[in-house]
Amino acid sequence: MGQDEGKDFNRFPKGADPAHLWGAGSEKDWMVIAQISDTHILARSSEQAVGAARAENLRRCIADINRGGVDVVVHTGDSVHHGMAEEYAHLREILADLEAPLFLIPGNRDRHGALRVAFDHLSYLPRNGDFLHYAVEDQPIRLVALDSVAAGERKGVFCARRLAWLEETLAREPDRPTILFIHHPPFDIARHYVGGYRRPEDARKLAAVVSRHPQIERLLCGHVHRLHRESWGGTVATTMPSVAVDLRKGVDKAIEAAPLYLLHVASGEDGLVSHTRVVTH
Ligand SMILES: [Fe+2]
């Protein structure tokens, strides 16, 4: 899609609903972003039973996404469990079935070097430097991916260099609807998740940058493995359950075996509406 069409985001009509996405091929006039997160894939050679289960969880989500209607897929981190090359090889093999473009950010379980090697075909990932963050410009909604990971650190980090990059990136396109995605949520979730950034001021600085850029329609996060929605930094922030079923939290036992992912559906009149997609087949 060209840049002019991208700016015409407001033409999307009312009533975009993912229930229609898998109907008989009607003309599509909205943008759909599928979000997957925390897949925690193990090496194919792993003898742990969860290894095969997690691979299957992701495969089922991909098969469902491939049914059609999804424009892009974002993966909000912790793609593999130990950051090992064999795990990334397994992940890449599974993701090869995905038909829509994939945009990946690291989580604390990822390792930048191994991720870069395994996904060297993804041209948007910076080849060099300390961070794996980037902006996607050729979609109706601009996607900005911020790297919150520091080597050897479980918690999120938002340092001066990341702050400068984010400020500059957001200031470049103040009028384009934007979705920001970051692995670590920069807010607490009751007793479930407290102090997720190494320094409390990191999260406050991040909120200050985001609140200065009202074009940010949504912040999408992973890391906490549970569904949550928060009013934060002048926008709406959401987290999602892990695709790895054995690690997710707060999901009803009735759908124990079914992996799930999120669909964020954008239309000009309705804004951005998020849906949970439970994969029962
Ligand atoms: Fe995780």
Image (cartoon, helix red, strand yellow):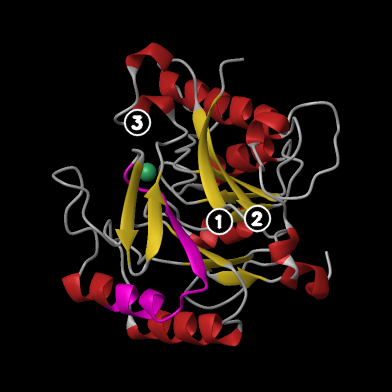
253 sits to left or right of 88:
left
The stretch of residues the image draws in magenta is: 205-224
> Foreground mark, 3 or 2?
3
Above or below, 109 against 59 in this view is below
* Residue occupying image coordinates x 47% and y 79%: 166
Question: Label 2's element?
Answer: loop
Q: Which mark is residue 247?
A: 3
Residue 208 among those drawn in magenta: yes
Quarter of the image where ligand 1 sits: top left
Above or below, 145 against 27 in this view is below
Could you tell me residue 277's position as x and y percent? 54, 30
Q: Within 10 angstroms of label 3, few (less than 14), some, or many (20 or more) residues?
A: some
* Residue occupying image coordinates x 52% and y 73%: 215
Q: CA distance from mark 3 to mark 2?
A: 25 Å
Q: Earlier in the sequence, mark 3 or mark 2?
A: 2
Q: Earlier in the sequence, mark 1 or mark 3?
A: 1
- From the image, tell me which residue sits under label 1: 115
Q: In terms of image quadrants, where is residue 127?
A: bottom right
Is ligand 1 closer than 8 angstroms to the Cβ of mark 2?
no
Task: Tell me which amino acid carries mark 2.
Answer: Phe
Above or below, 16 against 43 in this view is below
Q: In terms of image quadrants, where is residue 1?
A: bottom right
- From the image, tell me which residue sits under label 2: 119
**Could you tell me if the residues under marks 2 and 1 are in contact, i.e. CB atoms within 8 Å?**
yes
Could you tell me residue 276's position as x and y percent? 50, 33
Q: CA distance from mark 2 to mark 1?
A: 6 Å
Residue 37 among those drawn in magenta: no
Is ligand 1 closer than 8 angstroms to the Cβ of mark 3?
yes
